[in-house]
Image: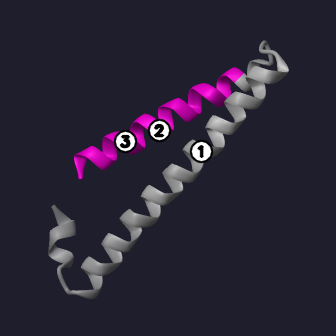
Amino acid sequence: MSNSKNNFESSLKKLEKIVAKLEEGNIDLDDSIKSFEEGVMLVKECQKQLSEAELKVEKLLDSGDSELLED
């Protein structure tokens, strides 16, 4: 699980850097488009990871193993 957390955290940090770079507005159009495309891919990956985590939590709650979540 720590691996997926690291991937999520890493993707989120990359996304934050891309947003900051785009907000500065000091890059040309081609670089802006490339950065935007990378950002969209990162958002989709983060959403996928969050959905997977949500499903795991739902399964744990449904199976009555909610004690595992209290740690």
Q: Which residues are magenta?
A: 1-21
Q: Are marks 2 and 3 in contact (CB under 8 Å)?
A: yes
Q: Find the distance from the CA under tag 2 to the CA under tag 1.
A: 10 Å
Mark 1 or 3, which is nearer the eye?
1
Residue at 68 percent of width and 21 percent of height? 21
Q: Main secondary structure of the magenta part?
A: helix
Closest to the observer: 19 or 41? 41
Q: Quadrant of residue 10?
A: top left
Name the amino acid type tagged 3: Asn
Q: Find the distance from the CA under tag 2 to the CA under tag 3.
A: 6 Å
Closest to the observer: 47 or 35? 35
Q: Is residue 44 above or below residue 61?
A: above
Task: Give the SS element for disc 3.
Answer: helix
Q: Quadrant of the C terminus?
A: bottom left
Is residue 10 within the magenta segment? yes
Determine the residue located farthest toward the top in the rendered image. Answer: 26
Task: Give the SS element for disc 2.
Answer: helix
Residue 41 image label: 1
Q: Is residue 23 visible?
A: no
Q: Position of residue 29 (x, y in %)?
A: 84, 22
Q: Is residue 39 visible?
A: yes
Q: Quadrant of residue 19?
A: top right
Residue 11 image label: 2
Q: Is residue 17 above or below residue 57?
A: above
Specify which label sits upstream in the sequence, 1 or 3. 3
Q: Position of residue 30 (x, y in %)?
A: 79, 22
Name the amino acid type tagged 1: Met
Q: Is residue 56 above or below residue 31?
A: below
For mark 3, what is the residue? Answer: 7
Q: Position of residue 1 (x, y in %)?
A: 24, 53
